[in-house]
Amino acid sequence: MIQKQLHGFLNTPPLWTSEQFGLREFNFPEISLDHFLAQPIPQNIRLGHQMEYVFKQLIAYCDIYEIVLHSLPIKEGNRTIGEIDFILKEAQTEKLIHVELTYKFYIIDPEISEPIHRLMGPNKRDMFFTKMEKIKEEQFPLLHSPEGIMALSSKGINPHTIEHQACFKAQLFVPFKSKRVHIRPLNVNCVLGYWLKFDDFNAKEFRSNTYYIPFKAEWVVAPHNNVPWLSHLEILMEINLRMLKENAPMVWMKKPDGQLDKFFVVWW
């Protein structure tokens, strides 16, 4: 599983390239995993925190960056007001880079006019625009707050010499049977599947395929055959239970010809 997560992370494109929205995208180095020995990653933590372990292992393995610090809490008295994900040092230039790491799964709602407002979590509780604004307005400035300056100074780091970048990887899902969805200036290579409503999934065209509902830790992973596949009727019952809890599951689908797809079934 860990090796698959590493491959999944590396193969997930950044949500934008260069600079957009006043945020520079971190250019993740190309890394070969042929001789890489992965360290265990806790499976009882949120997927976002698992991705921090993945990022840390991969960056530590490459020779382009040195990890100066990771997950540094910023405190105001006894209260934690934020956390710095990573500060890296570029080996060649010794430049310090503050990297805020984000890995998201967004469906695209084409009925919303502005492209950057179309991206939301499959349960509609997580918006790309909100997260992007938080990085720009809260997480980056945190390093230059009195508390941030004090925390970094205690580590021998001058916050005024740091460049801010976002490592924002995402998997995007377009509406089922949609021909074209405009998301510029976002990266269209992030589109890796589709989404549909429960009633649309309960249709004749889906009945001859087999299905699997991956655990959250498997969402990063590309669909593969080595899972316990279920019939359409069996998966309908599993999905219906999640619909009642207002939870949109990711589903892997295997067609009779062996083609593998991934999609979300939404409850709303």
Image (spheres, grey):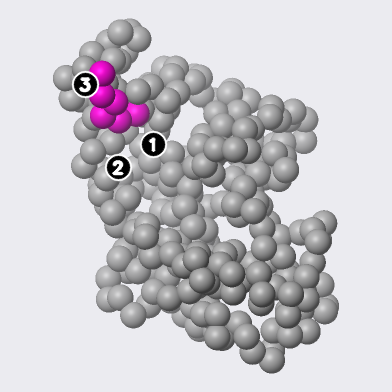
Does residue 53 lie above or below 106 as drawn? Answer: above
User: Which badge, 1 or 2, is on the more N-terminal residue?
Assistant: 1
**Segment tinted magenta in the rendering:** 78-83
User: Which badge, 1 or 3, is on the more N-terminal residue?
Assistant: 3
Query: Horizontally, is 112 left or right of 16 in the view?
Result: left
**Residue type, mark 2 in image:** Ile
**Which corner quadrant of the image does residue 47 belong to?**
top right
Q: Residue at x 59, y 45 (%)?
A: 9
Q: Is 196 in front, or is 69? A: 196
Q: Which residue is mark 1?
A: 100
**Which corner quadrant of the image does residue 1 belong to?**
top right
Please say if the residues under marks 1 and 2 sit with CB atoms less than 8 Å apart.
yes
Does residue 146 lie above or below 201 as drawn? Answer: above
> Is any atom of residue 182 visible in this view?
no
> Is any atom of residue 6 visible in this view?
yes
Q: CA distance from mark 1 to mark 2?
A: 8 Å
| Mark 2: secondary structure | helix
* Percent of width and height locating residue 162: 30, 24
For marks 2 and 3, give the one nearer the viewer: 3
| Mark 3: secondary structure | strand
For residue 81: magenta? yes
Magenta-drawn stretch, dominant element (helix, strand or loop): strand
User: Which badge, 2 or 3, is on the more N-terminal residue?
Assistant: 3
| Disc marking residue 135 | 2
| Disc marking residue 76 | 3
Q: Residue at x 27, y 34 (%)?
A: 140
Q: CA distance from mark 1 to mark 3?
A: 20 Å
